[in-house]
Image: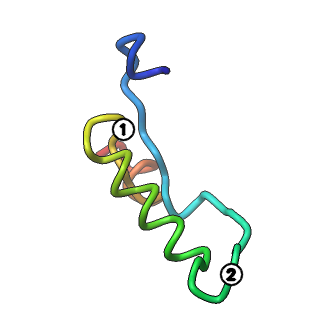
Amino acid sequence: MARDLDFFVDFPVDATGCPELSETATQDVIKAATAATLVAGFARVVTTAEWLAGS
């Protein structure tokens, strides 16, 4: 919604947690899928270090 309102959205992927849903749907898999979806036009996916550096 923020992107639809013309806000710039940064998503610090390494600062985000989620529960593991199963042996195959691990936290890393879920975070990778979320990042792939967001980077397709909804947000800039960054690490915390990149975000803090302002890049």
Relative to 43, residue 30 above or below: below
Relative to 2, residue 20 above or below: below
Is 34 on the left-hand or right-hand side of 18? left
Query: Which is in the foreground here, disc 1 or disc 2?
Result: 2
Pinpoint residue 33: horizontal percent, then vertical percent: 42, 62
Mark 1 falls on what kind of element? loop
Determine the image quadrant of residue 26.
bottom right
Q: Earlier in the sequence, mark 1 or mark 2?
A: 2
Q: How many marks?
A: 2
Q: Which mark is residue 43?
A: 1
Is 6 on the left-hand or right-hand side of 21? left
Going by the numbered disc 2, the residue's amino acid type is: Ser
Pinpoint residue 55: horizontal percent, then vertical percent: 29, 46
Pinpoint residue 11: horizontal percent, then vertical percent: 46, 46
Q: Looking at the image, which residue sits at the far bottom?
A: 23
Q: Looking at the image, which residue sits at the far top?
A: 5
Categorize mark 2 by other alpha carbons within 10 Å: few (<14), some (14-19), many (20+): few
Front-lying residue, 39 or 52: 39
Relative to 42, residue 39 above or below: below
Going by the numbered disc 1, the residue's amino acid type is: Ala
What residue lies at 39% left-to-right and 16% top-to-bottom?
Answer: 4
What residue lies at 37% left-to-right and 55% top-to-bottom?
Answer: 50
**Pointers 1 and 2 in contact (C-beta within 8 Å):** no
Categorize mark 1 by other alpha carbons within 10 Å: few (<14), some (14-19), many (20+): some
Mark 2 falls on what kind of element? loop
State the CA–CA distance, disc 1 to disc 2. 27 Å
Front-lying residue, 31 or 44: 31
What residue lies at 34% left-to-right and 57% top-to-bottom?
Answer: 36
Residue linked to disc 2: 22
Pinpoint residue 32: horizontal percent, then vertical percent: 43, 67
